[in-house]
Image: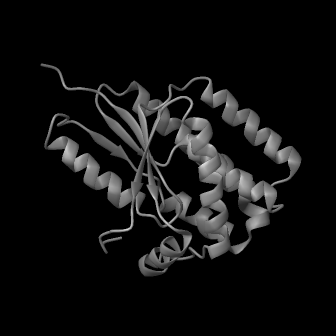
Amino acid sequence: MSEPKYYYAVEAIIGAGKTVFLRALTERLRTGECPHAEGIFEPVDGPEGDLIRLFYSDMKRYALLLQIHFLHVRFQFHLRAALSPTTVGLDRSLFGDVCFARINHRRGNISDLEMAVYDRARNTMLNFMPYPDVVIYLDISPEEAYERIARRARPGEAVPLDYLAELRDEYETMLTSLGRHTHIHRVAWTDFPDEM
């Protein structure tokens, strides 16, 4: 009997614990019906870490650079997941990426022209991607995410609480739209292990 193939994404606001959740789910799948399951994790070290730190130091200057970089990284991850012969989960997706771009646009960090360029690039990429079988949304309050960010203490990660609240609102909008194309599974993610 062949191994089933699922393609899914884990979404949540910054600090929710997507990586920890995806690691645990991938391990559980590997011990069950999907022994070759793979998790593709959002990069936070190397060039990505440098870009994230630059963004938090000067959001207006680095917002578009960060968004376009992650847009391409996430597109590559989606293609890898879609073409994989086995189950693959993504730690954030191209669908959730737009939430960050919209906030940066609304806050004046990305101009109208830059947002149009971002939207055109994203829409082109979306035309070549299947929707995931399911999107798992880790539902957490901005206040709890803010506390988790402080506990993990990544260098240069200074996420304001109002940004997290705005991000949660954007996610709600995005999930409503995405729910017309794929299944959204919400997980109340208040009980969380301390190992971030």
Residue visible at 63% across and 67% down in the picture = 165
In the picture, which quadrant includes the N terminus? Answer: top left
Please indicate whether residue 106 sits to the left or right of residue 85 in the image: right
Q: How is the image coloured?
A: one colour
Q: Is residue 69 visible?
A: no
In the picture, which quadrant includes the C terminus? Answer: bottom left
Please indicate whether residue 44 sits to the left or right of residue 172 in the image: left
Residue visible at 43% across and 80% down in the picture = 151
Residue 153, x across and y down, in percent: 46, 79
Residue closer to the observer: 154 or 134: 134
Residue 28, x across and y down, in percent: 20, 48
Residue visible at 57% across and 76% down in the picture = 156
Please indicate whether residue 88 sits to the left or right of residue 112 in the image: left
Total of numbered circles in the picture?
0
User: Eyeballing the image, is 8 above or below 112?
Assistant: above
Residue 13, x across and y down, in percent: 53, 60
User: Eyeballing the image, is 106 above or below 179?
Assistant: below
Image-quadrant location for residue 58: bottom right
Residue closer to the observer: 51 or 169: 169
Image-quadrant location for residue 29: top left
Residue visible at 61% across and 70% down in the picture = 53
Residue 92, x across and y down, in percent: 49, 49
Q: Residue furthest top?
A: 1
Q: Is residue 33 visible?
A: yes
